[in-house]
Structure formats: structure tokens, C-alpha cells
Image (cartoon, rainbow, N blue to C red):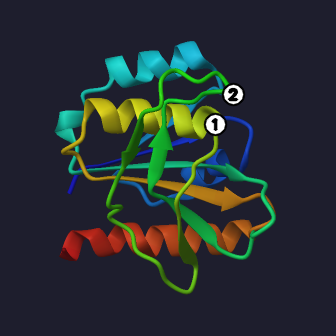
């Protein structure tokens, strides 16, 4: 099972990425539009069975990790058309995860929109981890979910 996991520098997703089980391709991205676009162009995503992205979430409903399902062409309040992509994530709602339908308009949304628009057939999931979520719990539940993919 080939899994690519990416997160962003300087937040909880980078810390989680460093502690995830080995055997996965891992990338840390800067919160930078040019780097994100280069990442989408440079990586051979077709070599992977699953792609998981992670970023930090600072909203009010921070009791669970958010599984984002809808990504838009809007970035930093700059509307670039009115396009959206909705995905069926490969992780599911549970005690630790909840389904969410709006990834915002920042870098998490940008990388997800660009990826899902270019590679619609590759199973994709984006997790927004609440800033206040316990790090060790996040590492444990995400590792457990990714290990469970081997049995699908």
C-alpha cells in the first residue's frame, strides 16, 4: 500500500507527520502558493494508492479532527470562478473524526482544490486538526486509520 501524507511547516500537522509510522512518503509544505503549485506539478501522485493532507484548524468546533469533503477555487478571498470539488474521503466519521464540508480559503483549501481537480481518481482525504487537539492522540488515531487502509 503506497500512501503519501503531507502537512504544513510550523503547525501541528508537521509534528504529526514526523511521528507517523514509517513506510509512507511524507512531505512538509510551506504555506506558500508557489511551493504548493510546484508540489502538485512535481510529485508523481499516480504512484500512490492514497493521498492524505493535513493542516491546522483554529475554528470553534475543535473537539474532533475534521475530514474535509469540499474544496473551492477561492483562495484568500480572491474568487477565481465559482468552482468546487467534492470528494468521498477514504477515512470515515468516528469518535475522533467528523465530516466537514468547507475547507476554508487558505493553503489547505488551495492544495486540496488543485490536487482533486488534477487527480480526481486518486483517493484523497484532507484532515484539519484542531490547534488544541492533543498531539499524542492525533498521532495515534491517524496512525490507526492509515494502518486500517491495508485491509480495505
> Crowding at label 1, few (<14), some or many (≥20) Cα neighbours within 10 Å?
some
**Quadrant position of the C terminus in the picture:** bottom left
Residue that lies at the very extreme toward the front in this rendered image: 82
Which one is closest to the eye, mark 2 or mark 1?
Answer: 2
Q: Nearer the viewer, residue 92 or 46?
A: 92
Residue at (75%, 70%) from the top-left corner?
Answer: 61
Please, what secondary structure does the residue beneath circle 1 have? Answer: loop
Expressed as whole percent of the image width and height from the top left, the position of residue 129 reads: 65, 59
* N-term mark: 2 or 1: 2
| Residue highlighted by disc 2 | 77
Expressed as whole percent of the image width and height from the top left, the position of residue 9 reads: 67, 35
Residue at (65%, 34%) from the top-left corner?
Answer: 106
| Residue highlighted by disc 1 | 105
> Crowding at label 2, few (<14), some or many (≥20) Cα neighbours within 10 Å?
few
> Vertical placement of 136 versus 53: above or below?
below
Expressed as whole percent of the image width and height from the top left, the position of residue 54 reads: 55, 50
Q: Which mark is residue 6?
A: none
Q: Nearer the viewer, residue 137 or 112?
A: 112
Q: Looking at the rendering, which quadrant does residue 132 occupy? A: bottom right
Amino acid at each position: 500500500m503506497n500512501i503519501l501524507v503531507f502537512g504544513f511547516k510550523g503547525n501541528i500537522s508537521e509534528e504529526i507527520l514526523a511521528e507517523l509510522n514509517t513506510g509512507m512518503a511524507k512531505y512538509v509544505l510551506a504555506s506558500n502558493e508557489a511551493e504548493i503549485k510546484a508540489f502538485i506539478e512535481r510529485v508523481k501522485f499516480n504512484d500512490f494508492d492514497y493521498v492524505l493532507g493535513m493542516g491546522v484548524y483554529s475554528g470553534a468546533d475543535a473537539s474532533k479532527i475534521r475530514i474535509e469533503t469540499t474544496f473551492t477555487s477561492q483562495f484568500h478571498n480572491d474568487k477565481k470562478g465559482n468552482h468546487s470539488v467534492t470528494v468521498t474521503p477514504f477515512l470515515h466519521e468516528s469518535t475522533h473524526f467528523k465530516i466537514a464540508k468547507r475547507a476554508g480559503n487558505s493553503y489547505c483549501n488551495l492544495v486540496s482544490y488543485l490536487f482533486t481537480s488534477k487527480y480526481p481518481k486518486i483517493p484523497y482525504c484532507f484532515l484539519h486538526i484542531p490547534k488544541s487537539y492533543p498531539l499524542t492522540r492525533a498521532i495515534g488515531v491517524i496512525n490507526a486509520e492509515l494502518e486500517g487502509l491495508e485491509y480495505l
